[in-house]
Image (cartoon, grey):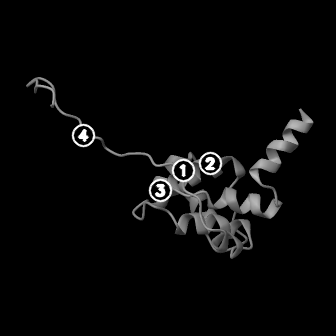
Amino acid sequence: MPAPHNPRQLPLNMLTYYQAPSMVSTAQIDAVKTYRGAVLACWALRNRPHLTKRQLAEEVGCYASHVTDYLSTNEAKRDMPARHIAEFEAACGNRFISQWIARRSELTVLEEFVAQRRVG
């Protein structure tokens, strides 16, 4: 049963909801050969199709002109620094870049955990 309505209190509808970034298929990861390609694929597979580069820049915490460089197919443009990966993936809604890096290093999360336990 809903709570009684208080005329002095306005209802606040939920503006958005957060869904953690999803994983992508191994076939998609294997099709990408460069870091820039992984960044571009992450953007292409975003779950928010109306997300603009300017909005992405605000969410990631960088300049819009830098995002334009990160999403350029021109290899001479600046690459996205690693410090922005988590926020970039969260904004796009997928873990393409992290999965691509892990695949390239040929380390599974479990292998990394076991290696860390041996070191520390």
Q: Mark 2 is on which residue type?
A: Ala
Task: Tell me the mark number nearer the camera, choosing from 4 and 3.
Answer: 4
Sequence-first disc among 4 and 3? 4
Task: Please state which of residues 30 and 113 is positioned toward the viewer in this rendering.
Answer: 113
Sequence-first disc among 2 and 3? 3
Q: Residue furthest bottom?
A: 31
Task: Determine the residue positioned at 87% across, 44% down.
Answer: 115
Q: Residue furthest left?
A: 7
On the image, numbered disc 4 is attached to which residue? 13
On the image, numbered disc 2 is attached to which residue? 86
Could you give the CA–CA distance between mark 3 and mark 1, rounded to whole angstroms? Answer: 15 Å
Q: Mark 1 is on which residue type?
A: Ala
Task: Determine the residue positioned at 50% across, 63% down.
Answer: 46
Quarter in which the C terminus is drawn: top right
Residue 79 appears in the figure: no
Could you give the CA–CA distance between mark 1 and mark 4, rounded to whole angstroms? Answer: 23 Å
Secondary structure beneath dot 2 equals: helix
Could you give the CA–CA distance between mark 4 and mark 2, rounded to whole angstroms? Answer: 28 Å
Could you give the CA–CA distance between mark 2 and mark 3, rounded to whole angstroms? Answer: 17 Å
Task: Tell me the mark number nearer the camera, choosing from 3 and 1.
Answer: 1
Task: Please state if 39 lies on the left or on the right of 116 as rendered.
Answer: left
On the image, numbered disc 3 is attached to which residue? 54
Sequence-first disc among 1 and 4? 4
Q: Measured along the vertical axis of the image, is residue 44 above or below residue 52?
A: below
Task: Tell me the mark number nearer the camera, choosing from 2 and 3.
Answer: 2
Residues under numbered marks 2 and 1 in contact, where contact means CB atoms less than 8 Å apart = yes
- Count neighbours of disc 3 (C-alpha within 10 A) and say few if under 14, some if 14 to 19, many if 20 or more: some
Percent coordinates x, y for residue 93 in the rendering: 51, 56
Residue 50 appears in the figure: yes
